[in-house]
Structures are given as structure tokens and as C-alpha cells.
Image (cartoon, rainbow, N blue to C red):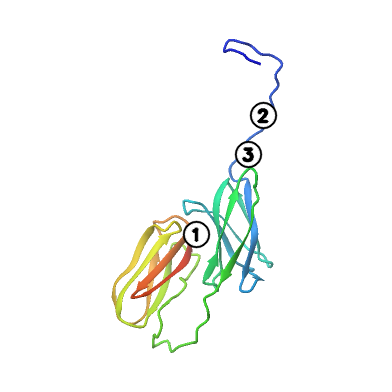
Amino acid sequence: MVVDETSLINGINFTVIARPDSGWGWISGKVVAGIGEAASGSFVYAVDDMNEVVSFAMTDKNGNFVLDGVAPGEYTVVPDRADYMNAVVATAVVSTNNFNPFVNVRLENDAPSDAKDASVVTNYQLSQNFPNPFNPSTTIRYSIPEAGVVTVKVFNILGKEVATLVNGYHQAGSFNVSFDASNLSSGVYLYQIEAGSFKATKKLTLIK
């Protein structure tokens, strides 16, 4: 049928489907740790492309989680638990075609090292911040076995530097530095140490 702008057409029915409000999707999945055991009691975060935490949850005894109230978009799903240093994240896309994506994520630990006399530092080390998650401040501990220039910086999940905590010459030893994130938004961040040829990076999570 061809009509012009002055034509009147009768007898045509339309069905209008309401568009749902944002936040109608959810992300479900499972957190595993070590060699595959369920990681119960873990925090899980959905982080958007602006590094904002849009939803978070805690896993049940089987390591399962549900992140609800999620709008359409692409998210990084990040697990975290105090006794694990590293995480393997996953990407989840919520859309009208898939409003409940399922992802698996993993917690991993650094290889264990032999206990050393705390008064003698023999290795470079960057420890997990505590507390984590945190609001608004947390403490980062690091050790260097020899004197030299040390930098400790914080980056957002997109790799943009947001803070320089340490930038100077240090004698050998163990040190604590406080990170105040009062001026930053909730999200997952990375902190990195460089000392001589040593470089290490870990993640921290700010929740406001």
C-alpha cells in the first residue's frame, strides 16, 4: 500500500510492547578456586566499561552467584576473596536476546613460599591490600631486599593511572602505604610496584 501525507487509513491495528526498565537482566555463574573446588563466601562484582560496580553478590556454599538488576551492556565479572591473591575474570553481555548470561570465574593463589625471618627481607614482594574490598582507604604492604628507586601506582581497570602512592629511593625493608580513594568511584582497580627489574600487579576493590 502506498499513501501520501494527506491520506487517511482506517482499519489498521497496532500492538505496542512496553520496553522494560533498565536493570531487568541478571548475570549468574559459579566461582571456582584452586583445582576446581567451589569458592563459597566469595564476593563477585559486575563492572561496566566506566569501571563502575553496577551489581555485586556473595557466592553460596556451592560457589554459585546471581548479579541482579543489570541493564543491557557488556560487563567484566570479577571474583574476590581475602585468602586468594589473583582472579581470572570473565566478560558477560546482557541483551534482549540474552538477559541472563552465565559465566564461570576463578580465584587463584600465588605459589606458596617458605617462611622467612620477618626482620630480614630476601625477596621482592607485593602483598594483597587490606582490607579488601574497602571504603575509602586501605593499606598496601611491599618488601624490597635491596635499596633502590620504588614506585607504587594505582590504575583503573582500563589502565589509566589514578594515583601515585610511592615514588622515591628506599632502603631495603618492608613498608606500608595507605591508599585513600575518597575521590574515586566504586570499582575494581589495579596497584603496581616497580623496583629495579621487579614489577608486580594486584587488584583491589572499592565499594562505596
Residue 192 location in percent, x, y?
40, 68
Residue 140 location in percent, x, y?
42, 71
**Which residue is labeled 1 in the image?**
207
Of 38 and 140, which appears nearest the observer?
38
Residue at (62% x, 36% y) in the render = 19
User: Where does the N terminus fall, quadrant-wise?
Assistant: top right
Residue 13 location in percent, x, y?
70, 21
Residue type (three-letter) at the residue carrying disc 2: Val
**Which residue is labeled 3 in the image?**
20
Query: Given contact means CB atoms under 8 Å apart, are the residues at marks 3 and 1 in contact?
Result: no
Residue type (three-letter) at the residue carrying disc 3: Pro
What's the mark number on residue 75?
none
**Which residue is labeled 2 in the image?**
16
Residue at (67% x, 65% y) in the render = 60
* Crowding near the residue tagged with mark 2, few <14, some 14–19, many ≥20 C-alpha atoms within 10 Å: few
Choose the circle earlier in sequence order: 3 or 1. 3
* Crowding near the residue tagged with mark 3, few <14, some 14–19, many ≥20 C-alpha atoms within 10 Å: few
Query: Given contact means CB atoms under 8 Å apart, are the residues at marks 2 and 1 in contact?
Result: no
Where on the picture, by quarter, is residue 154? bottom left
> Which of the two discs, 3 and 1, sits closer to the camera?
3
Q: In the displayed image of the protein, which residue is found farthest to the left?
A: 169
Query: Given contact means CB atoms under 8 Å apart, are the residues at marks 3 and 2 in contact?
Result: no
Answer above or below: position of 72 versus 90: above
Residue type (three-letter) at the residue carrying disc 1: Ile
Per the model, the C-alpha gap separating discs 2 and 1 is 40 Å
